[in-house]
Image (cartoon, rainbow, N blue to C red):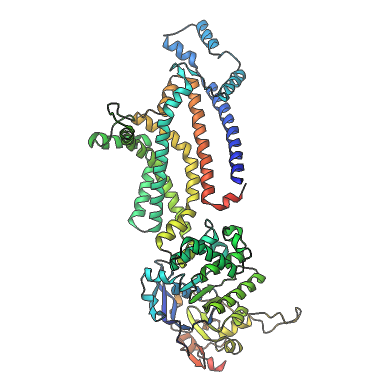
Amino acid sequence: MAIFMTILQRLTYAALLLIAVLVLNFTMMNLAPGDVADTIAASMGGADAELMDKIRAEYGLDQPFIVQLGAYIGRVLSFDLGYSYFYNAPVTELIFERLPATLLLVIAAQVLALVIGVLLGVFSARHPNGVANYFVTLFALFGYAAPVFWTGILLLIGFSLKIPLFPVAGMSDVTIEGGFFVKALDIAHHMVLPVITLGSIFLALYSRLSRASMLEVLGSDYVRTAKAKGLSPREVTLKHALKNALPPVVTLAGLQFSAVISGAVLVETVFSWPGLGQLALTSILARDTPTILGILFFSALVVIIGNLLTDLVMRMIDPRVRGRA
Amino acid sequence: MTEPLLKIENLRIELALRSGQAPVIDDLSLELRPGETLSFVGESGCGKSMTALAIMGLLPEKVGSIAGGRILFDGRDMAQMNDAQLRSIRGNEISMIFQEPMTSLNPVYTVGEQIAEVLRRHKGMSKQAAWARAIELLDAVRIPNAKSRVSDYPHQMSGGQRQRVMIAIALACAPKILIADEPTTALDVTVQAQIFDLLRDLGRETGTAIILITHDMGAVSEMADRMVVMYAGRKAEDGPVAPVISHPRHPYTKGLISCVPHLLAKLTEQRPDLTEVPGIVPALASFGADACLFASRCDMADDKCRSSRPPEVAFGEQHSACWKADQL
């Protein structure tokens, strides 16, 4: 029962947070100079003040700010994110077309970074003076310092051009025909480089943290107890130590979720990945306010869901968290 | 005399320090007989816990190592065993409980799982059988409502209860030896007495020999059959508890005993016999010196004490490593 109460409580917080995000986003977009009328006028090759006013009146941009804000929130609450003047399509449709591609990239990168990062961290904590340890430290430094787009371009040059193992761009090959399995394989093939590029930064972070966390746990009294029970080094490390070393890593992964999404924007641009990132970039250049707001809204939603999941995972790992309301 | 269960011969343990290898245990020999309770006594840092960890094969990795001597358990030398052989003994034939019950249990597993795990590991029990046995063991260490407490997590238990769980884990496989490293130091006084009672009763029931590491002389006289007084990594004195306490043959033992206040005295009464042992244990680097390491704190010390290490002298079953043992 307690778990449902907690989820309910978190969901309420999440809803309030979303509304706050909506207000903030809308306000900031309004503070920025220029609007869609400018873009339309520019695409028409110029317009006089009268025409500009007409366009603004048509899109409701002449209303006072608070009225516009109220109308916007009202629309969002009824699941209407507005209409993109630039793409001539409802924003929801635009986003749902591209959200799966971004989610695929983000989740794959996050999972890759977590699994490999934790494994590397555990391994280097078990052998603190070994070669692996120096490798992890060096790799972490590199992964954290190198800009995503640079890593991406290097990988492209290396593994698409010089050694043509992977496709250069896009998410799928339109010429490939076949069943679900063939298409999934094709997408997986296209995913390899973008996922590695996006995952590398976070892999570096997680491996460093899990190494530190693991080193601390390995010195704890209950690990000594586990050894005194006659358990094998593998059981001691993976059963008794790892589960206790995970909470800091899970917390960080939850916090980094938003960073992974913003990293995805860059990676999508480098690899022409048909996701939200590309949409965001074009709509910002086109001052397509409804689309930008829609993307921001969905990003916030994904981050909030990510945090909610983090909470639940923490409860699964650590029984002491369950006791707290 | 019965054949000893555990026989330590000339054990030398070295620690790797920045300045080089330094002995923490030097030329230590002792015996543990089946079913008896042997107490290791001494100040912090004198090597009691280090000896226990050596018996368990749990010396800190890459820092501590056995540099010489033998640890004979049932005729086999544990100092020569590989890790797999040691693991099959640890928690099975020799088990250990620690000083800190609050942190010695894994916070993310139920106490039942932590008990059942040893049974599955060493006795090859099925999941259900091990869980059922865990309930029996919780009951045996006198935790009320064992059946419902078995799925509790450590944070739902008090310090005393956690130490009981540790005892249940340690006794799960009916070991021949239980090493209790200051099992009550972190607990309050009434709980201390309960834990000692429990250890004594269970030791008697199962015939488990107990090595009790403590600096509580009261516990020693109540629990132990024989005692080993350790000082700076060496044995100062050993023998049956009664003669050692009534007539210590080493000034350090004497000092330890006169540190203990008795409640019999009136609170206002002056206690000229309640004294302290002046000074502190010498630095680790000087543990290897050819001298009596206690000399700097001993009011009987002379040049001989400071220039050569005293040999062991026997007084019946009591042994003392002091040049002046016969004058005490």
Instruction: Specify whether residue A235 is in view.
Output: yes
B195 or A198, which lies in front? B195
A321 or B48, which lies in front? A321
| Location of residue A183 by image quarter | top left
Q: Position of residue A148 (x, y in %)?
A: 37, 36
Residue at image location 67% in from the left, 71% down from the top: B190
Q: Is residue B60 above or below residue A138?
A: below
| Location of residue B184 by image quarter | bottom right
Instruction: Specify whether residue A215 is in view.
Output: no
Q: Is residue B112 above or below residue A291?
A: below
Q: Is residue A20 above or below residue B118?
A: above
| Location of residue A237 by image quarter | bottom left
Q: Position of residue A270 (x, y in %)?
A: 35, 31
Number of on-image labels: 0
Q: Position of residue B149 (x, y in %)?
A: 60, 60
Residue at image location 45% in from the left, 10% down from the top: A41
Residue at image location 59% in from the left, 85% down from the top: B254
A290 or A205, which lies in front? A290
Q: Position of residue B272 (x, y in %)?
A: 69, 84
Q: Is residue A16 above or below residue B7?
A: above
Q: Quadrant of the N terminus of chain A?
A: top right
